[in-house]
Image: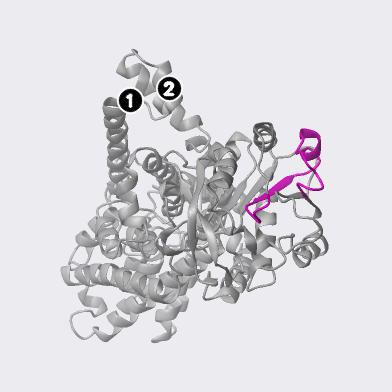
Amino acid sequence: MKNKNGCDVHGAPHKGANRTLLVLMGAALFLMVWQVWVNGPTAQALKSKLAGESFFVIFGYEIWDMIVSTDGLAFQITEVFPYFMVGVFFAGYIRTYKLTQKMQRYLNRYGKASILLGATIGMFTPLCACGTLTTAISLIFMSMPLAPIMALLVTSPLMSPSAYLITYNYLGPEWTVIKTLASFILGISAGFLTHYLRNKGFQTKEVLIEGAIARGDFHDEHYPDEKFKCDCKEKFGNRVAAKTNNMFVIFLAKSTEMFLMVGKYVLVGVVIGVIVQRYVPQDWISKLFGQEGVFSIVWITFGSIPIFLHQLSTPGVLYNIKGTLDSTLNGGAALAFLIGGPVTAMPTMIMFWAVFKKRVFALYMFICVVGTIIIAYSFQALIFTPYVDTGNALLRGVGSVSGGRGAIIDKGPEAEHVKIVMDPQQKSLLATYYNPNAGIGGVVFDAGGAKFMEDGAGKFDNEKYIRNAAAWIEDQSFSMSSSRKILVYILSNEPGKPHNSFSSKVLDSLMKKDDFSVSVTSRRETPEISEDLLLQYSQIWIFSGMDKSSGTFLSDNEVEIITQINQFGSGLLIGIGQQGDSAEGLADINRLAKEFGVTFSGSVENSDELRVSKFVDTFRIVPEIMGKWYKLIN
């Protein structure tokens, strides 16, 4: 029977994390109440419907809309749930077969190399910072040097199998590699700094407060130190393990325990992400996470300290933040948020303060805060490409694309489903629309559409980008009538095969390498776009402004047909050529683009080559290797 009053040896279970979660939820609720009280319901459709209703009725509708809206809480949870469950089962496996205890024994065998090993082990343990403290205490009781323990303490709350998968799902393989590398660098830096300070009050026997015992899971039947081991079976998984030798039953019990223990952090993270997207003023977020904030990294690092940001919740919050920006994400600021928040979680700080001597606490805080700032600024200078959405599927494996003259994409104030992909000179050139919960096909907006044409597609990595665009649109397509069929429609009346024809090389790649069926036509060959024509394809690519020929604009009926086909699930690409600065031409194509909260305007002259990624091969190969490794150990 579970001892509800706590263990005689270790006291009552630590509740600091739960209290922090409740505070965060209370703050989120307060923000919702304030916004509804001052501004009314968020959804425009509800403003007129609920006019004159009481505050409580309006607030109830607001909560319901937040849950069921196209990018709301229910959708976000279904997106992250499969990845979360894989991590839960892996964590259950580790705890069932006592792999953590085996890892502890390995750490005792090596000298300085144990720092590298400690940092590596920390990234594969399914523990948050609070859980890692328990492991750290047991290692100290085993006379382990503080250096590898510090490396373990820093990396464990930053990366785990679950965090790897969730980061991959929300932000892509590039961000997964960046976060893993940053976590490892921060961990080994912590370890080696502690090692060089070992004779200045950081010997193992000098780091704990006399008589202090860290609260946590000392109730494991295989806990390595008999002095602090007891059999009160406070944990559900341990109570089951004491009653049966069936490893599968124990595995299910441990997995259930991890689901309940970690699931609350994921849920709170998703809720915070949705609330940030709906209620936090866009100007605030833009100043912190946009490209212009020089000191954003510093503000985010220090601002994250009092907030409980779990490794499983930060990727989802960051994903939602991207949707609120009218620019690309500041890579350095985002990295500071990903690693600075989880490693300085408030419950961990409380436990650290209570157990370790103050100089150890100060060292840990120094490493976490200063290390986060240094790593974020270093990565921003060396790895991130300014004005590029790192990790975007359209740019995967792309080193650079053509620039030159193009139009400018303007994102509307309520276009939360539109994400800016590239904005050189802070002028948006490439964007996507993604709203799967509404059953609408994905849309790509390219204000430099000349890269698709015969003269441009062979330059730089344009062909790879075009193939990525086709693959992404197909993945977001919900068309029931056809698949992997693309209609390329060029609004041109020029005869023959002019310079602005769709690239034959790209056409060949799409059909032979990617197994697409592609049909290319123009205004001259197909004078009118009809519903019967579009229903034959899963993707429709419309290119406007490729020449100055007359009579190449869309009619009202054609705009309506294209919009309806997209709402039926077919994907769409809208490309604007170098002649797209024509006021008449932009007004025409904007009647279509406005359906998604986007407009094209003016023109901008970019450099001939626009850099996308500095480490194309690394971002392609490393995620594959790491993915295979995680599958192997799982």
Disc 1 packing (10 Å; few <14; some 14–19; many ≥20): some
Residue 545 colored in magenta in the image? yes
Question: Could you tell me how far apart the alpha carbons at marks 1 and 2 are, in whole angstroms?
Answer: 9 Å
Residue 410 image point, x, y percent: 46, 48
Sequence-wise, the earlier of marks 1 and 2 is 1
Q: Residue at x 30, y 18 (%)?
A: 55
**Element under label 1?**
loop
- Tell me which corner region of the image, top left, top right, bottom left or bottom right, holds residue 117: bottom left
Compared with 392, 15 (above or below) is: above
Which residue ends up furthest to the front in the rendered image? 550
In front: 233, or 13? 13
Residue position marked by numbered label 2 in the rendering: 46
- Residue 162, visible in the rendered structure: no
Look at the image and give the residue range highlighted in magenta. Answer: 522-549
Disc 2 packing (10 Å; few <14; some 14–19; many ≥20): some
Give the residue type that dot 2 points to.
Leu
Checking the image for residue 100, the label placed there is none
